[in-house]
Each structure stands twice: as structure tokens, then as C-alpha cells.
Amino acid sequence: MRKSQRFNILFGLAMAAVLLSGSAAVFAGVPVPLLPEPVKSAVEGEESCVLPEDEMRRVHMDRLKHQRDDTMHEGVRTSRFSLKECISCHVTKNDAGEKVSVKSREHFCNACHAYTGVTLDCWDCHASQPDGGQ
Amino acid sequence: MSKQIDSTHDDRQVSSGRREFIKQTAATAGAALASGALLYTGEASAKPADEAVTSAQRWGILVDTSKCADGCNDCVNACASENGWGSVEHDPRPKTDAQWIRSVTIRNKQTSAEHTLPLMCQHCENPPCADVCPTGASFRREDGIVLVDKHICIGCRYCMMACPYKARSFVHETIENQIEYAPRGKGTVEACTMCVHRVDDDRNPACVEACSHQALTFGDLKDPNSDIAKQMKQHATKELRADLGLNTGVRYKGL
């Protein structure tokens, strides 16, 4: 076993001990975002997202970047991993039934990114809601 | 944690059915030709969405200045509404507001002959904008369309200085409510994309579609059967600033 692996395991155990010993209450003040359900399933006949949820959490940025370069430079226009497709599936509506933009904490992308404190500049250029919010 | 991605999820790999369909369609079209039917080849040829563009095509626009009507601004307006530039929140600032295509009147000082023509990115084969771009954001696609990859554009505006046609604009203001297929944002340079989202969808650029005087022809310069190639074979056409040797994709007839 390498030294770094041993450290990782020890660190993991330490963290688990901290969490289990009731210190988790420290985090209770920050509400974990409830991700809005997608309006339609991306792949016909499949219930899930374009990838299993746990995988999407890890690799969605890689997939988006890959697709971004393919589309921009090679004109590949498949929709599976396109930002546009994410936006159109995961469109969120507010209580008034209007599509919300990324300025709202209810917005699918913003729900997580605001929670994790990650500021993205995708929406400086890209539309954050399908069909201009109509 | 490994970042390896399962390639079986890539939809580029599941396109054999679609290719088969295209082959069959082509065969049917061949049969129709043999029976004497006419096949219109003047338009863009379909590219499956999952395939990359290649240099087998070179897209171009031919402008017939003799048909271009005085005072008509249809192509400019169509471009603006298609791509979302032109309407600004602030008071118009003509010197710096984005302009992807504009109507220009040129006059020969000796003969006083005047021509009105639309001027936009000329989609050069040897684009000076791409030459000077320090990040590689300005580039020419394999099929000849010159674009700005705004993901890597740092907004230095060197390309704007290099372009002999003044075809590029810099976005100075924060933009909201962009059009889905036409992302634009503050701090990046932009220009005519030859409506690349339409071209990839087998449609004509918005300006060409909007021209009611048939002054604009879009097509594949490399396909001898295309409308544009036939016209260019038949008539004398000009590149603007041909002396620069840029081999532009936009050509003018009647100048």
C-alpha cells in the first residue's frame, strides 16, 4: 500500500468518525439543494439522465467540454451532451409557472453551483432557459 | 478517481442505422435520376449530426450587386434578428455596437459608378484574424467557415485590427436573454458565422433566405453542380481586396 493511499484511508475514517459523532449538526444550517426533476427523459424509453446520476455528478463538466469542442470546431450537432439539451430537459419553473433563469436559486444548474460556491460563466453567453424563457 | 468515460454512452457510436438510411436514400435518389427526374443539387448537402465537417465542402456566398436594391436592408435585419444583435438596451452607439453585416455603398471616383452591397466576414481561406489570434480562438472550420471560439477568446481584439473588411465586433456590454443557438457575451469578439447553426442543419443562412431580390446565393464552392459554382463559372466574380490573396468565401458579381 502506498503512503498516499494509507493517508486517504485514514483521512476518510477520521472524517467518518467526525460525521458520525454528531458534529454533522454543524452543517445543518446550509440547506442541501433539492434538484428539480427533469421535464422529460433525455433518452426515449429511459428513465434516467443521459448518464447515471452518480456519473453525471462527476463527469458532466468533462462531457460538456468535450461536446463543446466537437460542436464548435467540427460541427458535430448531437444533442446528448449538449448544454442546450441539459437546459431544455432540466428547465425549472417557479410558482408562477414561469421558466426561471440562472439568476434564480431554483434554476437546475444554479441550485448546485450556488450551494458549492462555484461561479460559472456559461451563461454570460449561453441562454440559461429554453425558448427565451417563453 | 478515474475520469475515464465509458465510450459506449457516446452517441457518435450508434449511428450505423442512420448511415444505412442515408445510403438507401441516396440509392433511391439515383433511381429517380435514372428515370429522368430532376434532382436539385444547388443546396447544401445533408451531413449527419454526429459527423464532423470535412474539407470536401467549402461554403460560400455569392453577392450579385446588380440585383442588390438601393435602400434595402433585409439581409442586415434578418441577420440581426437571427443572431440576436442589433437591439441594444442602451442608446445606440454605432461606433462600437456589434454589427455582423452592414450595407455599404461604394463609388468609383473616376466613373461615379455606385454599388450597394452587403459586407460581412468574407470567410477567407487564409484568414488574417486567425493568423494573429494569440489563443487560437479565431479559426477556420474544415468546410471554410471562419469562427470565433468564444470559450477561448480573451477579447484582445487583435483580430479586429487584422481584418481588412472590419467585419468583426467586440461585445462591450453584458448581454442577457441570448438566443439558444447564438451564444454571445461581453468581452468576446464576434462576427458573421455564415449562420453555422443553419448550415449544419442543411438550411441557408438567414441573409440569403431573407433576400427577396435573389442577390445572394449560398452553396458549396467545391461542388461543380451547385448553383453558386455554376454562377461563378459563368460570370466574372470578384473578391474584395483580391490583392491580399486571402481567397475569400464571399464573392461579388457586378462590381
Image (cartoon, coloured by chain):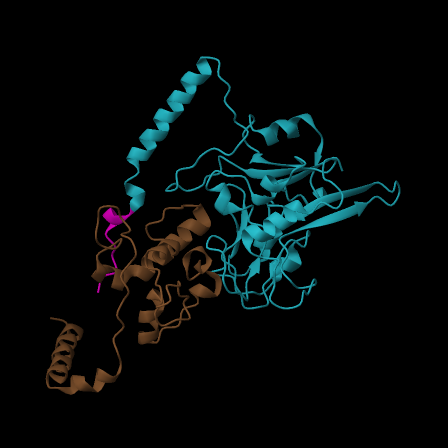
Chain colours: A brown, B cyan
Q: Up-down: is A59 above or below A7? A: above
B2 inside magenta stretch = yes
Q: Is residue B182 magenta?
A: no
Farthest residue to the front: give it. Answer: A96
Q: Quadrant of residue B163?
A: bottom right
Give the residue at x 68% y 36%. B213
Whether residue B142 is visible: no
User: Where residue B103 appears, x then y in whole percent?
Assistant: 71, 49
Q: Is residue B201 left or right of residue B95?
A: left
Location of the N terminus of chain A by quadrant is bottom left
Q: Quadrant of residue A116?
A: bottom left
Numbered disc total: 0
* Residue at horizontal 54 percent and vertical 45 percent from the top: B145
Judge by depth and name the residue closer to the eye, A66 or B70.
Answer: B70
Residue drawn at 37 percent across, 63 percent down: A97
Give x and y (percent) for residue B203.
50, 39
- Which of B50 and A10 lies nearest the eye of the viewer? B50
Front-lying residue, B81 or B105: B81
Is A24 left, or right, of B74 in this rendering?
A: left
- In this rendering, the answer to whether A93 lies above or below A69 is below
Magenta residue span: B1-10
Residue B11 appears in the picture as rendered: yes
Q: Quadrant of the C terminus of chain A?
A: bottom left
Q: Is A4 displayed left or right of A118 in the figure? A: left
Measured as percent of width and height from the top left, residue A40 is found at 29, 53
Q: Main secondary structure of the magenta part?
A: loop
Residue B48 percent across, percent down from the top left: 39, 38
